[in-house]
Amino acid sequence: MSAGVLYPQRRQRATDDLRDRGVDLAYLTADADVRYLTGMPYGSVLFLFASGRSILLPWDELLARKTAQIDEILPYTDFGRDLVTAVTEIAGKANLKAGSTIEIPSDTGHLRYAKLKDSLEDYRVLCRAEDLSSFISRRRMVKDAAEIAVLRRACAMTDQLIGEVTAGVTDGSLRTEADVAVYLEGTALARGAEKMGFETIAAGPERSYGIHAHPACTAAKFGTPGLSILDFGVNREGYTSDVTLTFARGPMNDRQELMILLVEKAYEMAAAMANPGTGTHAISTAVDELFARDGFSMPHGLGHGIGLEIHEAPFLKSNRETGVILEPGMIFTLEPGLYDRTAGGVRLENDFLITESGHEVLTTSRLIRLP
């Protein structure tokens, strides 16, 4: 489907939601929401009217005119790059009737909310948890065909990099954490990635105990005896992959072998359960119970959705209230992990697509035993 059709269709669903909830005008500032509805990558305010009209206020007008699919573009500088001024003037120019409902994002701070209330005294201003951004987040949780195609491309590039990094660590050409991180970023950008999906985490045996090592990489050795963790993703056309590999070199002690065994077992069990109709909380709970039987506890969630954001719905946690039922089109990570201050860390993470009949694993991350 062409962008000329795709973005208007997505906005139509959003304006339908506004009408269903009795909202006349709403605006969005989150980059992921704006990009999902217009194609504009960053730095914009998007106004949507229940009538179907849409206006984009970009910080970079030239970029917007090249990339955004939208009805109308007005430079943010025309409003002094001030959100309260922009909302007030857009409402006035649109000739909204007195008493019309204007919805502002749920994350609006108290001071800004007060200013908007004062400036929009002729309108009904609503700030509530279930706002337009919440609706869009639910829509983004199930990827459409265009999004799946882009994520496949991101995952394909990721798999190429997995193979190359594995070869480099094995033959010793990539010796340090920094070597690995710099190779990944330079190669990904040279092959057409927009950027890395997030800061690459390369942690050698002395630092792999951290869930997300800090700093993300150093000049320390990587892939030397012990457990090393590599967590990275690539961003293609706004969408990011996310994988984690663990490198195990040399003889492992009993605790390390047990951690490896449990993580691989948890991954296989979670993957087998990742099918349409299964609750995310059920998968997460099963993994937590598996670890607990051997006295371990996983200090993070089992996985999360990926897309225009590196962490987005659905989230796989042992919480029935916040869980969702998996359905075709959802793309998320499964990443069981265990960590020990002395033994180091083990994490295995791949990207999964839920299909009509089960699931598809989009990446080929694995635990790699080095000689």
Image (spheres, rainbow, N blue to C red):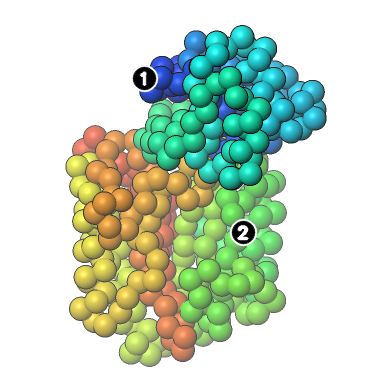
Assess disc 1: are there few (<14), some (14-19) or many (≥20) residues with their C-alpha within 10 Å of its C-alpha: few
- Please indicate whether residue 139 sits to the left or right of residue 64 in the image: left
Along the viewing direction, whichever of 29 and 143 lies nearer the viewer: 29
Q: Residue at x 45, y 21 (%)?
A: 23
Along the viewing direction, whichever of 267 and 332 lies nearer the viewer: 332
Q: Residue at x 59, y 38 (%)?
A: 113
> The disc labelled 2 sits on which kind of residue?
Glu
Q: Is residue 153 visible?
A: no
Please give the residue where the numbered disc 1 appears in the rendered image. Answer: 20
- Please indicate whether residue 306 sits to the left or right of residue 202 in the image: left
Give the label, 2 or 1, closer to the camera: 1
Residue 258 lies in what quarter of the image? Answer: bottom left
Which is more N-terminal, label 1 or label 2? 1
Which percent across, then down, holds residue 108?
57, 41
Q: Residue at x 62, y 51 (%)?
A: 196
Along the viewing direction, whichever of 293 and 371 lies nearer the viewer: 293
- Please indicate whether residue 254 sits to the left or right of residue 214 in the image: left
Which percent across, then down, holds residue 120?
61, 25
Which percent across, then down, holds residue 71?
62, 13
Q: Secondary structure at mark 1?
A: helix
> The disc labelled 1 sits on which kind of residue?
Asp
Which percent across, then down, holds residue 126?
49, 31
Residue 247, placed above or below residue 143: below
Q: Residue at x 66, y 15 (%)?
A: 92
Q: Secondary structure at mark 2?
A: loop
Residue 340 lies in what quarter of the image? Answer: bottom left
Circle number at residue 199: 2
Assess disc 2: are there few (<14), some (14-19) or many (≥20) residues with their C-alpha within 10 Å of its C-alpha: some
Q: Is residue 128 visible?
A: yes
Circle number at residue 110: none
Q: CA distance from mark 2 to mark 1?
A: 40 Å
Along the viewing direction, whichever of 63 and 235 lies nearer the viewer: 63
